[in-house]
Image (spheres, rainbow, N blue to C red):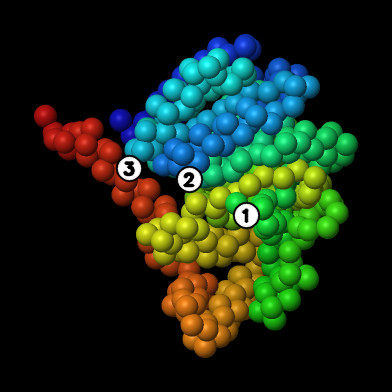
Protein backbone atom coordinates (compact mmCIF):
# COMPACT_ATOMS: atom_id res chain seq x y z
CA UNK A 1 0.00 0.00 0.00
CA UNK A 2 1.41 3.41 -0.99
CA UNK A 3 1.91 6.31 1.46
CA UNK A 4 -1.16 8.21 0.18
CA UNK A 5 -3.44 5.24 0.62
CA UNK A 6 -1.85 4.46 3.97
CA UNK A 7 -2.43 7.99 5.25
CA UNK A 8 -5.99 8.00 3.96
CA UNK A 9 -6.60 4.86 5.99
CA UNK A 10 -4.82 6.33 8.99
CA UNK A 11 -6.91 9.47 9.06
CA UNK A 12 -10.10 7.43 8.78
CA UNK A 13 -9.34 5.81 12.13
CA UNK A 14 -11.62 7.99 14.21
CA UNK A 15 -12.90 7.07 17.63
CA UNK A 16 -15.88 8.97 18.96
CA UNK A 17 -17.54 9.31 22.30
CA UNK A 18 -21.14 10.46 22.62
CA UNK A 19 -20.85 12.80 25.59
CA UNK A 20 -23.91 14.96 25.85
CA UNK A 21 -24.20 15.83 22.17
CA UNK A 22 -24.55 14.50 18.67
CA UNK A 23 -21.55 14.04 16.38
CA UNK A 24 -22.39 14.16 12.70
CA UNK A 25 -20.17 12.78 9.93
CA UNK A 26 -16.81 14.32 9.05
CA UNK A 27 -18.18 16.01 5.92
CA UNK A 28 -20.35 18.36 7.98
CA UNK A 29 -18.07 21.28 7.01
CA UNK A 30 -19.67 21.26 3.58
CA UNK A 31 -23.10 22.08 4.98
CA UNK A 32 -24.53 25.55 4.84
CA UNK A 33 -25.15 25.80 8.60
CA UNK A 34 -22.77 24.81 11.37
CA UNK A 35 -24.14 22.43 14.04
CA UNK A 36 -21.96 24.01 16.75
CA UNK A 37 -20.46 27.42 17.42
CA UNK A 38 -16.83 26.45 17.91
CA UNK A 39 -14.65 23.40 17.39
CA UNK A 40 -11.65 23.18 19.72
CA UNK A 41 -8.88 21.51 17.71
CA UNK A 42 -5.67 20.16 19.23
CA UNK A 43 -2.76 18.45 17.47
CA UNK A 44 -0.57 16.36 19.77
CA UNK A 45 2.84 14.78 19.19
CA UNK A 46 4.19 13.00 22.27
CA UNK A 47 2.88 15.68 24.62
CA UNK A 48 0.65 13.57 26.84
CA UNK A 49 0.80 15.56 30.07
CA UNK A 50 0.54 18.90 28.28
CA UNK A 51 -2.39 17.58 26.25
CA UNK A 52 -4.29 16.42 29.32
CA UNK A 53 -3.70 19.81 30.95
CA UNK A 54 -4.99 21.52 27.81
CA UNK A 55 -8.15 19.40 27.75
CA UNK A 56 -8.83 20.03 31.42
CA UNK A 57 -8.48 23.78 30.84
CA UNK A 58 -11.08 23.58 28.07
CA UNK A 59 -13.54 21.76 30.31
CA UNK A 60 -12.96 24.23 33.15
CA UNK A 61 -13.31 27.45 31.14
CA UNK A 62 -15.71 26.87 28.23
CA UNK A 63 -18.69 29.24 28.64
CA UNK A 64 -22.11 27.64 28.93
CA UNK A 65 -23.57 29.80 26.16
CA UNK A 66 -21.41 28.31 23.40
CA UNK A 67 -22.18 25.04 21.63
CA UNK A 68 -18.83 23.34 21.16
CA UNK A 69 -17.03 20.15 20.25
CA UNK A 70 -13.50 18.94 20.98
CA UNK A 71 -11.26 17.32 18.37
CA UNK A 72 -7.83 15.85 19.16
CA UNK A 73 -5.47 14.59 16.46
CA UNK A 74 -2.75 12.35 17.85
CA UNK A 75 0.24 12.47 15.52
CA UNK A 76 1.51 8.87 15.84
CA UNK A 77 2.62 9.45 19.43
CA UNK A 78 4.42 6.67 21.27
CA UNK A 79 3.99 8.05 24.80
CA UNK A 80 0.50 6.71 25.48
CA UNK A 81 -1.23 9.99 24.62
CA UNK A 82 -4.20 8.40 22.82
CA UNK A 83 -4.94 5.97 25.63
CA UNK A 84 -4.64 8.75 28.22
CA UNK A 85 -7.10 10.94 26.28
CA UNK A 86 -9.57 8.07 26.03
CA UNK A 87 -9.28 7.45 29.76
CA UNK A 88 -9.91 11.13 30.48
CA UNK A 89 -12.88 11.18 28.11
CA UNK A 90 -14.41 8.13 29.79
CA UNK A 91 -13.87 9.37 33.34
CA UNK A 92 -16.42 11.39 35.33
CA UNK A 93 -18.76 11.95 32.41
CA UNK A 94 -15.99 13.03 30.07
CA UNK A 95 -16.08 16.57 28.74
CA UNK A 96 -19.84 16.92 28.44
CA UNK A 97 -19.20 17.80 24.79
CA UNK A 98 -19.08 15.95 21.47
CA UNK A 99 -15.54 14.61 21.23
CA UNK A 100 -13.43 13.05 18.48
CA UNK A 101 -10.01 11.46 18.59
CA UNK A 102 -8.23 11.09 15.26
CA UNK A 103 -5.16 8.85 15.36
CA UNK A 104 -2.53 9.17 12.65
CA UNK A 105 -0.72 5.95 11.76
CA UNK A 106 2.20 8.06 10.46
CA UNK A 107 3.75 11.27 11.73
CA UNK A 108 2.79 14.29 9.62
CA UNK A 109 3.45 18.03 9.71
CA UNK A 110 1.61 20.61 11.80
CA UNK A 111 0.03 22.37 8.82
CA UNK A 112 -1.35 19.14 7.37
CA UNK A 113 -2.69 18.04 10.75
CA UNK A 114 -4.35 21.40 11.43
CA UNK A 115 -5.97 21.24 7.99
CA UNK A 116 -7.30 17.75 8.74
CA UNK A 117 -8.98 19.06 11.87
CA UNK A 118 -10.36 22.14 10.09
CA UNK A 119 -11.91 19.89 7.44
CA UNK A 120 -13.35 17.56 10.09
CA UNK A 121 -14.70 20.27 12.37
CA UNK A 122 -18.36 21.19 12.42
CA UNK A 123 -18.16 24.57 14.12
CA UNK A 124 -18.66 27.98 12.56
CA UNK A 125 -15.27 28.71 14.11
CA UNK A 126 -12.34 26.43 14.93
CA UNK A 127 -9.89 27.21 17.72
CA UNK A 128 -6.47 25.81 16.82
CA UNK A 129 -4.52 24.93 19.95
CA UNK A 130 -1.11 23.44 20.60
CA UNK A 131 -1.11 20.55 23.02
CA UNK A 132 1.04 22.70 25.33
CA UNK A 133 -1.52 25.52 25.48
CA UNK A 134 -3.99 26.17 28.28
CA UNK A 135 -7.01 28.40 27.70
CA UNK A 136 -7.85 30.78 30.53
CA UNK A 137 -11.35 31.97 31.52
CA UNK A 138 -13.06 34.13 28.84
CA UNK A 139 -10.44 33.19 26.22
CA UNK A 140 -12.78 31.30 23.90
CA UNK A 141 -15.71 33.68 24.22
CA UNK A 142 -13.48 36.75 23.66
CA UNK A 143 -12.07 35.27 20.45
CA UNK A 144 -15.52 34.27 19.20
CA UNK A 145 -16.91 37.72 20.03
CA UNK A 146 -14.07 39.38 18.09
CA UNK A 147 -14.77 37.40 14.91
CA UNK A 148 -18.52 37.81 15.19
CA UNK A 149 -18.11 41.57 15.62
CA UNK A 150 -16.11 41.84 12.36
CA UNK A 151 -17.39 39.71 9.46
CA UNK A 152 -14.24 40.53 7.45
CA UNK A 153 -12.01 39.01 10.11
CA UNK A 154 -10.92 35.44 9.33
CA UNK A 155 -8.67 34.69 12.30
CA UNK A 156 -8.08 35.99 15.80
CA UNK A 157 -5.13 35.27 18.07
CA UNK A 158 -5.11 35.23 21.86
CA UNK A 159 -2.52 36.94 24.04
CA UNK A 160 -0.09 34.19 24.99
CA UNK A 161 1.37 34.03 28.47
CA UNK A 162 4.46 32.25 29.74
CA UNK A 163 3.85 29.82 32.62
CA UNK A 164 4.91 32.56 35.06
CA UNK A 165 2.13 34.81 33.75
CA UNK A 166 4.33 37.22 31.78
CA UNK A 167 3.15 38.23 28.33
CA UNK A 168 4.83 36.73 25.27
CA UNK A 169 5.07 38.24 21.79
CA UNK A 170 2.35 36.55 19.72
CA UNK A 171 1.41 38.89 16.83
CA UNK A 172 3.66 40.45 14.20
CA UNK A 173 3.84 42.22 10.87
CA UNK A 174 4.22 39.84 7.95
CA UNK A 175 7.84 38.97 7.14
CA UNK A 176 9.65 40.94 4.47
CA UNK A 177 12.78 42.97 3.84
CA UNK A 178 11.54 45.84 6.02
CA UNK A 179 10.85 43.61 9.02
CA UNK A 180 14.20 41.85 8.58
CA UNK A 181 15.93 45.23 8.48
CA UNK A 182 14.16 46.28 11.68
CA UNK A 183 15.31 43.01 13.25
CA UNK A 184 18.90 43.60 12.12
CA UNK A 185 18.79 47.07 13.70
CA UNK A 186 17.22 45.61 16.87
CA UNK A 187 14.10 47.72 16.39
CA UNK A 188 11.78 44.73 16.02
CA UNK A 189 9.90 45.42 19.24
CA UNK A 190 8.84 48.77 17.81
CA UNK A 191 8.34 48.02 14.12
CA UNK A 192 7.64 44.26 13.92
CA UNK A 193 5.94 43.00 17.08
CA UNK A 194 2.25 43.94 17.13
CA UNK A 195 1.04 42.21 20.30
CA UNK A 196 0.62 44.29 23.44
CA UNK A 197 -1.71 47.21 23.98
CA UNK A 198 -5.17 47.28 22.43
CA UNK A 199 -6.68 44.73 20.09
CA UNK A 200 -6.29 45.52 16.39
CA UNK A 201 -5.70 44.01 12.94
CA UNK A 202 -2.19 42.55 12.58
CA UNK A 203 -0.13 40.72 10.00
CA UNK A 204 -0.14 37.28 11.60
CA UNK A 205 -0.78 35.59 14.93
CA UNK A 206 0.69 32.48 16.50
CA UNK A 207 -1.44 29.36 16.11
CA UNK A 208 -0.89 28.18 19.69
CA UNK A 209 -4.32 29.72 20.33
CA UNK A 210 -5.81 31.01 17.06
CA UNK A 211 -9.53 31.08 16.27
CA UNK A 212 -10.32 30.60 12.58
CA UNK A 213 -13.51 31.26 10.63
CA UNK A 214 -13.84 27.89 8.92
CA UNK A 215 -15.43 29.10 5.68
CA UNK A 216 -12.53 31.54 5.22
CA UNK A 217 -10.03 28.73 5.79
CA UNK A 218 -11.78 26.56 3.23
CA UNK A 219 -11.83 29.42 0.71
CA UNK A 220 -8.01 29.69 0.74
CA UNK A 221 -7.37 25.95 0.75
CA UNK A 222 -6.52 25.60 4.46
CA UNK A 223 -2.86 25.51 5.58
CA UNK A 224 -0.07 24.71 3.15
CA UNK A 225 1.36 21.24 3.99
CA UNK A 226 4.74 22.23 2.53
CA UNK A 227 5.30 24.10 5.79
CA UNK A 228 5.95 21.06 7.97
CA UNK A 229 6.37 23.11 11.14
CA UNK A 230 7.01 26.86 11.63
CA UNK A 231 5.77 29.64 9.32
CA UNK A 232 2.67 27.57 8.54
CA UNK A 233 0.38 30.04 10.31
CA UNK A 234 2.35 32.98 8.86
CA UNK A 235 1.67 31.75 5.33
CA UNK A 236 -1.96 30.99 6.25
CA UNK A 237 -2.54 34.51 7.60
CA UNK A 238 -0.82 36.01 4.56
CA UNK A 239 -3.15 34.15 2.19
CA UNK A 240 -6.20 35.10 4.24
CA UNK A 241 -5.09 38.75 4.06
CA UNK A 242 -4.55 38.48 0.30
CA UNK A 243 -8.16 37.26 0.06
CA UNK A 244 -9.34 40.51 1.66
CA UNK A 245 -9.71 39.17 5.20
CA UNK A 246 -8.42 40.58 8.50
CA UNK A 247 -6.27 38.96 11.17
CA UNK A 248 -7.01 40.19 14.69
CA UNK A 249 -4.98 40.34 17.88
CA UNK A 250 -7.34 39.98 20.87
CA UNK A 251 -5.62 40.80 24.19
CA UNK A 252 -8.78 40.11 26.21
CA UNK A 253 -8.34 36.44 25.27
CA UNK A 254 -5.47 34.85 27.17
CA UNK A 255 -3.86 31.43 27.00
CA UNK A 256 -0.79 29.98 28.67
CA UNK A 257 1.76 28.57 26.23
CA UNK A 258 4.29 26.25 27.79
CA UNK A 259 6.39 26.19 24.59
CA UNK A 260 7.60 22.65 25.19
CA UNK A 261 9.40 22.66 21.83
CA UNK A 262 11.75 25.43 22.90
CA UNK A 263 12.75 23.49 26.02
CA UNK A 264 13.54 20.32 24.08
CA UNK A 265 17.35 20.54 23.90
CA UNK A 266 17.69 17.26 22.02
CA UNK A 267 15.57 18.41 19.11
CA UNK A 268 16.60 22.06 19.23
CA UNK A 269 19.00 21.88 16.28
CA UNK A 270 16.41 20.12 14.12
CA UNK A 271 13.78 22.68 14.99
CA UNK A 272 16.19 25.50 14.15
CA UNK A 273 16.62 23.96 10.68
CA UNK A 274 12.87 23.96 10.09
CA UNK A 275 12.45 27.44 11.55
CA UNK A 276 14.87 28.99 9.07
CA UNK A 277 14.02 26.69 6.17
CA UNK A 278 10.34 27.54 6.37
CA UNK A 279 10.89 31.25 6.88
CA UNK A 280 12.94 31.13 3.67
CA UNK A 281 10.18 29.07 2.01
CA UNK A 282 7.70 31.79 2.97
CA UNK A 283 9.88 34.50 1.50
CA UNK A 284 10.45 32.61 -1.76
CA UNK A 285 6.71 31.88 -2.01
CA UNK A 286 5.49 35.44 -1.47
CA UNK A 287 8.47 37.63 -2.47
CA UNK A 288 11.18 37.85 -5.12
CA UNK A 289 14.40 35.79 -4.99
CA UNK A 290 16.30 39.03 -4.30
CA UNK A 291 14.07 39.83 -1.33
CA UNK A 292 14.47 36.30 0.02
CA UNK A 293 18.24 36.60 -0.24
CA UNK A 294 18.24 39.97 1.51
CA UNK A 295 16.18 38.57 4.38
CA UNK A 296 18.56 35.63 4.78
CA UNK A 297 21.55 38.00 5.00
CA UNK A 298 19.86 40.44 7.39
CA UNK A 299 18.62 37.66 9.65
CA UNK A 300 22.06 36.02 9.74
CA UNK A 301 23.59 39.38 10.67
CA UNK A 302 21.19 39.88 13.59
CA UNK A 303 22.06 36.46 15.02
CA UNK A 304 25.80 36.99 14.45
CA UNK A 305 25.69 40.22 16.46
CA UNK A 306 23.90 38.40 19.27
CA UNK A 307 26.50 35.64 19.16
CA UNK A 308 29.35 38.14 19.42
CA UNK A 309 27.65 39.91 22.33
CA UNK A 310 27.07 36.57 24.07
CA UNK A 311 30.82 35.93 24.19
CA UNK A 312 31.07 38.70 26.77
CA UNK A 313 28.17 37.41 28.87
CA UNK A 314 28.93 34.53 31.24
CA UNK A 315 26.38 31.74 31.05
CA UNK A 316 25.00 32.78 27.65
CA UNK A 317 25.33 30.16 24.89
CA UNK A 318 26.98 31.97 21.98
CA UNK A 319 27.06 28.72 20.00
CA UNK A 320 23.27 28.68 19.77
CA UNK A 321 23.28 32.11 18.15
CA UNK A 322 26.05 31.10 15.73
CA UNK A 323 24.00 28.06 14.74
CA UNK A 324 21.03 30.29 13.97
CA UNK A 325 23.24 32.69 12.03
CA UNK A 326 24.53 29.86 9.83
CA UNK A 327 21.08 28.41 9.26
CA UNK A 328 19.56 31.81 8.51
CA UNK A 329 22.13 32.32 5.75
CA UNK A 330 22.00 28.73 4.44
CA UNK A 331 18.75 27.10 5.65
CA UNK A 332 19.72 23.49 5.03
CA UNK A 333 20.11 20.37 7.13
CA UNK A 334 18.25 17.62 8.90
CA UNK A 335 15.12 19.07 10.43
CA UNK A 336 11.87 17.93 12.03
CA UNK A 337 10.53 16.80 8.66
CA UNK A 338 13.46 14.42 8.22
CA UNK A 339 13.07 13.15 11.79
CA UNK A 340 9.40 12.38 11.10
CA UNK A 341 10.33 10.58 7.87
CA UNK A 342 12.85 8.44 9.76
CA UNK A 343 10.25 7.69 12.43
CA UNK A 344 7.73 6.67 9.77
CA UNK A 345 10.35 4.44 8.13
CA UNK A 346 10.84 2.66 11.45
CA UNK A 347 7.10 2.20 11.77
CA UNK A 348 6.95 0.76 8.25
CA UNK A 349 9.83 -1.62 8.99
CA UNK A 350 8.20 -2.78 12.22
CA UNK A 351 4.89 -3.45 10.48
CA UNK A 352 6.57 -5.29 7.56
CA UNK A 353 9.80 -6.86 8.86
CA UNK A 354 10.18 -8.93 5.67
CA UNK A 355 10.27 -5.74 3.60
CA UNK A 356 7.29 -6.82 1.55
CA UNK A 357 8.95 -10.01 0.31
CA UNK A 358 6.98 -13.21 0.33
> Within the image, what quadrant is residue 170 found in?
bottom right
- For label 1, the residue is 164
Tell me the number on the disc at residue 109. Answer: 2
| Residue 167 against residue 245 in the figure, above or below | below
Q: Which residue appears at 42% of the width and 64% of the height?
A: 269
- Mark 1 vs mark 3, CA separation in Å: 36 Å
- Mark 2 vs mark 3, CA separation in Å: 12 Å
Q: Please indicate whether residue 80 sits to the left or right of residue 109 in the image.
A: left
Q: Which comes before the other along the chain, label 1 or label 2?
A: 2
Q: Please indicate whether residue 90 sits to the left or right of residue 169 in the image.
A: left
Q: Residues within 10 Å of mark 2 (few under 14, many from 20)?
A: some
- Mark 1 vs mark 2, CA separation in Å: 29 Å
Task: State yes or no: discs 1 and 2 in contact (Cβ < 8 Å).
Answer: no
Q: Which residue appears at 72% of the width and 60% of the height?
A: 172
Q: Nearer the viewer, residue 266 or 243?
A: 266
- For label 3, the residue is 344
Q: Residues within 10 Å of mark 1 (few under 14, many from 20)?
A: few
- Choose mark 1 or mark 3, whichever is in front: 1
Q: Nearer the viewer, residue 305 or 293?
A: 305
| Residue 164 against residue 317 in the figure, above or below | above
Task: State yes or no: discs 1 and 3 in contact (Cβ < 8 Å).
Answer: no
Q: Which residue appears at 76% of the width and 58% of the height?
A: 195
Q: Position of residue 126 (x, y in %)?
A: 67, 33
Q: Position of residue 57 (x, y in %)?
A: 61, 34
Amino acid sequence: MGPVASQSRAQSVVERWRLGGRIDDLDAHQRRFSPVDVSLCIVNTNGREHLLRCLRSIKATLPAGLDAEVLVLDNASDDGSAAAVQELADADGGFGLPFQLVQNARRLGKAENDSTLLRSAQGEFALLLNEDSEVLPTCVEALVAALRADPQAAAAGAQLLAPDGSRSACAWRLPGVNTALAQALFLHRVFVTQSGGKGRPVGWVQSAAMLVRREAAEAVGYLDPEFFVYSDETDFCKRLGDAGRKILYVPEAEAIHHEQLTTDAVGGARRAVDFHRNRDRYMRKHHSPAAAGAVRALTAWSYAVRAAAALAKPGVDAGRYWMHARLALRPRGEGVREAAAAYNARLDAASDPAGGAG
